[in-house]
Image: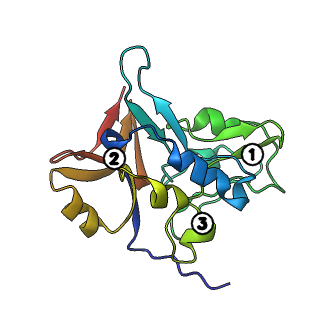
Amino acid sequence: MTSYYKTEMEFFVDMQRCIGCKACEAACAECETNGQQSMIHVNYVERAVTIQTTVQVCMHCDDPVCANVCPADAISKDEFGVVHTANTARCIGCSNCVMACPFGVPFKEESYDMMMKCNMCYDRTSAGKKPMCATVCPSQALYYGTREEMRRMRPNSVPVNTFQFGKLEVKTKVNIMMPKGATMLKVD
């Protein structure tokens, strides 16, 4: 099978722009490879005091801990840096990946007894198309395009794909938009 994956395209998440409409969740659930389940989640930051929402999507780590802790070798990362959801023939439903992910992304779908997560709409991106969530986001909190396009759109922000969790440094394929001058996001 020929892949038309465009390596110059990147995924950008701008948390400040999320309006909580959940269009991304609906679009993701429509993808036939997800079994009508959304692999992206919109969460409230602190519902009691703010209406601010944030979007949770797989960050596609350079060194995916979810794959590293899988005893069945069910999770793989391809040559484009996409970390795929668990291979149904291999996943044993142990939830190691769910507990290990520093971003809290994979979830165990109990009815299937297997892990599921975003695979960056690989069926679409490998055909040169954009992920479903990025095509429907009205505020462009989710954007799939080139770094240059993002630079023009958000001149006061910079894409960051390095995260510090205590002593653990994680680099990802997905970028979070941060104020200009930022080089990493530290999570305590």
The label nearer to you, 2 versus 3, is: 2
Residue type beneath disc 1: Pro
What residue sits right under mark 3 in the picture? Answer: 122
- Image coords of residue 142 (percent x, y): 41, 52
The label nearer to you, 1 versus 2, is: 2
Indicate which disc, 2 or 3, sits on the residue closer to the N terminus: 2
Q: Residues within 10 Å of mark 2 (few under 14, many from 20)?
A: many
- Image coords of residue 92 (percent x, y): 82, 44
The one of 183 and 166 positioned closer to us in this rendering: 183
Indicate which disc, 1 or 2, sits on the residue closer to the N terminus: 2
The one of 52 and 113 positioned closer to us in this rendering: 52
Secondary structure state at the residue bearing disc 2:
loop
- Separation of marks 3 and 1 at Cα, in angstroms: 24 Å
Q: Tag on residue 57?
A: none
Residue type beneath disc 3: Tyr
**Can residue 73 be seen in the rendering of this structure?**
no
**Can residue 101 be seen in the rendering of this structure?**
yes
Indicate left or right for 44 with 104 as reference.
Answer: left
Q: Tag on residue 14?
A: 2
What residue sits right under mark 1 in the picture? Answer: 71
